[in-house]
Structure formats: C-alpha cells, structure tokens
Image (spheres, rainbow, N blue to C red):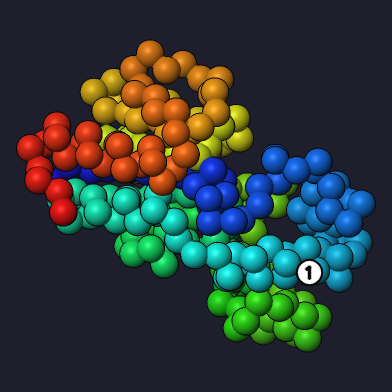
Amino acid sequence: MKNIVVLSGAGISKESGINTFRDSDGLWENHRVEDVANFDSWQKNQDLVRRFYNQRRKQAMEALPNQGHKELVRLEKYFNVSIITQNIDDLHERAGSKNVIHLHGEIKKVRSVRDPNYIISLQGWELTEDDKDKYKEPLRPHIVWFGEAVPMIEPAINLCQKADILIIVGTSLVVYPAAGLLNYASKDCVKYLVDPNDVKADLRDITFIKENASVGVRKVVEDIFNRNNIIGE
C-alpha cells in the first residue's frame, strides 16, 4: 500500500472560520502575537497568555471540519495516510483522519511547565489559574511557542522520507522547520501543492493547484485515484 503524507497549514483551517495570525495585523489586544506566544510572556503575564489561548480554544472547538479535511479522509480506504499539521486545532481528527502529527502542539491540551511529558486534555475551553499539574503549579497551553524546540519534527521527517505521495495544503512554505519537510521527500515522490495564493517555492516537480483547500484537495484526490486506477466513492 502506498504511503501518502499530507502537510497541512493554516489555510485549510481558515475555511472553517479559524483566524490565522499572518492574515491579521499581528496584534491581539494591542499586544504583538509574539508577545503572547513565548515562554517569557508566560512568566511575565500568565493571565494574558491564558486569555489569548482560551479564545483560540473556544474558536477551534466551535469550528467544524470543511470539505478539504473530509476529502483527505477518502484516501485512507486505499492508502496509508499520515497527516503532519502545523495547526493546533483537531479538525483533521474530527473529520475522521486517524494518523495525525501536530508539529506545533494541540490547543485542547495543556501541560506542566516542570515536566513536559505531563500532558492532559483540558475539559472545556477555559484554562484558569486553578488548573494545576501534579506539582501544584499552573498548567500551560500545550503549544510550541516561538523559540521552543519542535519535538515532533523527527517523526515528521521520517514520514516524508518514506512518502510515495506528498500533499501540501494551506501553507505558505515559509515557516521553518515545517517548510523544510518538503526537502526530505524523494525525487520519485509525487508532490502536490494546494494554495489559493502564489507560493515562493521551487515548483518544478510539484503539481500546483491554485485553489482553496475544499476545491483543491478534491482535485488532488481525484487525480490520485485516476493515476492509481481507483474508482472513488
């Protein structure tokens, strides 16, 4: 069974109504996004950081998977599909995708500052100062902040190295290390890029579909089915 790896970014979640930082003015309540998305900010003002992520969490929980998410699930009947997402929402999982790696963390989870392996799912959307870890210290969002290591990058690299087909959807290929994953795919790997915007990347061996995720991913799925003589449902 062929291996399909999907690298998804903010563009696919945007169609579900989830705002992207890069489409805004970079400010939130007069604070730069960078100022509420790093560990120094957490140490200086936990209430501000909690409030920022509580709003992100509430928005993500109210959003629904769109057709782009659902189209990717169709592939799982015929291929070994793994999704590497830069998104912190769980829309891929709620659409039905079974194998999902979150490079930048998960908005519905929180973790200990002292013990990075102490990770739990948050009940509801609101993280408060009363939510503590086993050391009785405040839990932080389970998010990879600016300046922090990306723990899941090595498993993501391994998947890309074994990919027979790579689908990139909704990402501008400018955020590293995620953008570098493309370089780990073999020269024989069939590559697709779905994005409604112009992308600053070498597209010589990539099929570029300049559409939003819902339309573009469907075109990719149909092309994959046609190339592999599959009559899709």
**Image position of 216 with respect to 206: above or below:** below
Which residue does the image show at 71% across and 78% down from the upper left? 126
Q: Quadrant of the C terminus?
A: bottom left
Looking at the picture, tell me which residue is in the foreground, 118 or 100: 100
> In terms of image quadrants, where is residue 74?
bottom left
Which residue does the image show at 66% across and 52% down from the upper left? 19
**Image position of 216 with respect to 71: above or below:** above
Which residue does the image show at 40% across and 49% down from the upper left? 68
How many marks the image carries: the answer is 1
The answer to whether residue 7 shows anywhere in this view is no
The answer to whether residue 58 shows anywhere in this view is yes
The residue to which callout 1 is attached is: 50
Residue 121: image x %, image y %? 56, 77
**Image position of 143 with respect to 12: above or below:** below
* Residue kind at label 1, given as amino acid type: Arg
Residue 223: image x %, image y %? 22, 34
Element on which disc 1 rests: helix
Residue 195: image x %, image y %? 48, 33
Image-based side of 8 in relation to 116, left or right: left
> Which residue reaches farthest top?
204
Which residue does the image show at 41% across and 46% down from the upper left? 214
Task: Classify 10 Å Cα crowding around label 1: few (below 14), some (14-19), many (20 and above).
Answer: many
Looking at the picture, tell me which residue is in the foreground, 197 or 30: 197
